[in-house]
Image (spheres, helix red, strand yellow):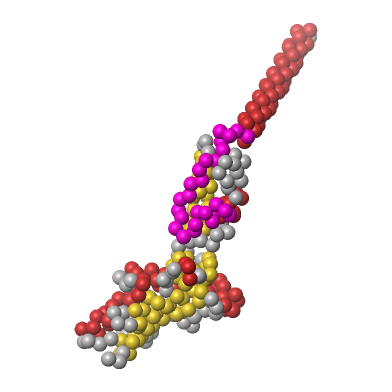
Amino acid sequence: MAQVRKVEAERDRAAWRSMLGAALRTLAAAALSVALSLGAWQAWRWAAASDMFAVREIRFTGLVRAREAELLRRSGLKIGENLFRADLARASRAMLADPWVSSARLERRLPGEVRVRIAEHRPAALVQLGGLYVLDDEGRLFKRAAAEDGLDLPILTGLSREAWVERKPELQLRLFSALHLLDTWQASGFPIAAISEVRLDEGGGFTLFAHDAIGVQEVRLGSSDIALKLQRLAQVRGVLARRGERAARIDLDNPARPDQAAATLADKR
């Protein structure tokens, strides 16, 4: 019996030693963590006050239309301020207020550089909505057009401001379709500069007003088989040119006879 009690006592002492060891290891780890945190805090305080990490350069990439001086003014970043105290998140948000800026990514580079990577909206067309607005290649209306923008782009018409407010999701899809039409026009070998207007017709179709060698030609495309219809447009123009004629209007949207086109000849002068 005494032997049994002795074994149990040894087992209890071993358990206590194990618990004590675990507790000491936990305390040691906590102390180390506190020491490291304190050391890191002290290091940050030193770096955030040291002239060694003063901002010496703010470098921009990706600028096309946005102006560096204006973005710097908006950002609040200053040469000479401490690199670690510069509020890059706030500066990024401020730069996004520039209508040309789609995204702004800022990063610190030791010892004293801020790098700013700007992605701009890429204008693809103008949209008439009671005023002219700029549409980017992702279908986003991002600013009102201004004369100083110097944009020579197709104008999308056929939408009203009221309809846009009331049916924006539906009409946004029409703008996507119009951009696809412009891409298909270029892929078919026609220059984008030839298009002066794309009218968004009722029923989902499109009518182009495009320059040929002589003047502006109205081209009714409808809403389907755009690539095929543009091939037919090139054929019709070629046939008329060989005959010394020119069409003022070409209708390629004939659901009953999709293989045919109707042309209204221009007056010869």
Q: Quadrant of residue 239?
A: bottom left
Q: Is residue 222 visible?
A: no
- In the rendered image, residue 236, in percent from the top left (x then y), is placed at 27, 82
- In the rendered image, residue 96, in percent from the top left (x then y), is placed at 56, 57
Left or right, 10 with respect to 52, comes to right
- Does the magenta-highlighted stretch encompass residue 231? no
Q: What residue range appears in magenta?
A: 49-74
- Does the magenta-highlighted stretch encompass residue 57? yes
Q: Nearer the viewer, residue 77 or 173?
A: 77
- In the rendered image, residue 65, in percent from the top left (x then y), is placed at 46, 60
Residue at image position (38%, 68%) is 183
Q: Quadrant of residue 33?
A: top right
State whether residue 102 is above or below residue 55.
below
Q: Quadrant of residue 234?
A: bottom left
- In the rendered image, residue 264, in percent from the top left (x then y), is placed at 33, 90
State whether residue 19 is above or below residue 64.
above
Q: Nearer the viewer, residue 28 or 162?
A: 162
Left or right, 238 with respect to 198, comes to left
